[in-house]
Image (tube, rainbow, N blue to C red):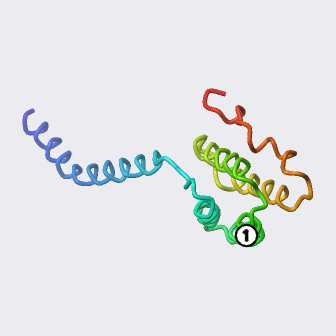
Amino acid sequence: MPLNGTKHFLQLLTCFPLLLVLFVFAAIGALKAQEEVKFSQNSELFINEISEKLQQTSNRNQLNQAKDLMNKLVPVWNQGRFNKAEKDGIKMLATLIFEQKLRPFPYLYDFMVLVNHFAKSRQLHRQHYILEQPCHCLAPGR
């Protein structure tokens, strides 16, 4: 009987390195998944970070869509189409998208398409008040 138990123990020991490696990879994956996304408060850095997030895809169609969108949006963003309060609202909503663990495609992409439509519109700045208000629909607990 003790020989049988020793045999099982030795079999477990031979599997231990494999289990240890799997555990380490799982732990690293969990830590990366929990990374907090914080966008820069600097507007120029923020729009570049958004562009990078959207282009972190292996899907060629999504990559082309992201590049096309950002080629249109970045110049308008940097030319001052949005005032500081509107840019702060956009940054807040983009951060909420990531805090809620929503994927860049379609969620961040669709939001930035909306921002681009606002940028191209001829409406007055005050009509974009939604960008200055907190978005309770994405707030935690809802």
Instruction: Report the residue at 23% width, 50% height from top.
Output: 15
Q: In the current view of this chain or complex, which residue is farthest to the top? A: 141
Q: Considering the numbered disc 1 on the image, is that residue within a helix, a strand or a loop?
A: helix
| Quadrant, the C terminus | top right
Q: In the current view of this chain or complex, which residue is farthest to the left? A: 2
Image x and y of residue 127, in percent: 87, 45
Image x and y of residue 16, in percent: 22, 49
Mark 1, Cα crowd under 10 Å, few <14 / some 14-19 / many 20+, is few
Instruction: Report the residue at 80% width, 60% height from top.
Output: 116
Total number of numbered discs in the rendering: 1
| Quadrant, the N terminus | top left
Compare residues 28 and 41 and report the one nearer the observer. 41
Compare residues 68 and 106 and report the one nearer the observer. 68
Image x and y of residue 97, in percent: 64, 45
- Horizontal side of 93 relative to 6 (left or right) equals right
Compare residues 130 and 24 and report the one nearer the observer. 130
Amino acid of disc 1: Asn
Compare residues 92 and 43 and report the one nearer the observer. 43
Instruction: Report the residue at 20% width, 45% height from top.
Output: 12
- Horizontal side of 58 relative to 36 (left or right) equals right
Residue linked to disc 1: 61
- Horizontal side of 89 relative to 121 (left or right) equals left
Instruction: Report which quarter residue 64 is drawn in.
Output: bottom right
Instruction: Report the residue at 74% width, 70% height from top.
Output: 75
Instruction: Report which quarter residue 140 is drawn in.
Output: top right
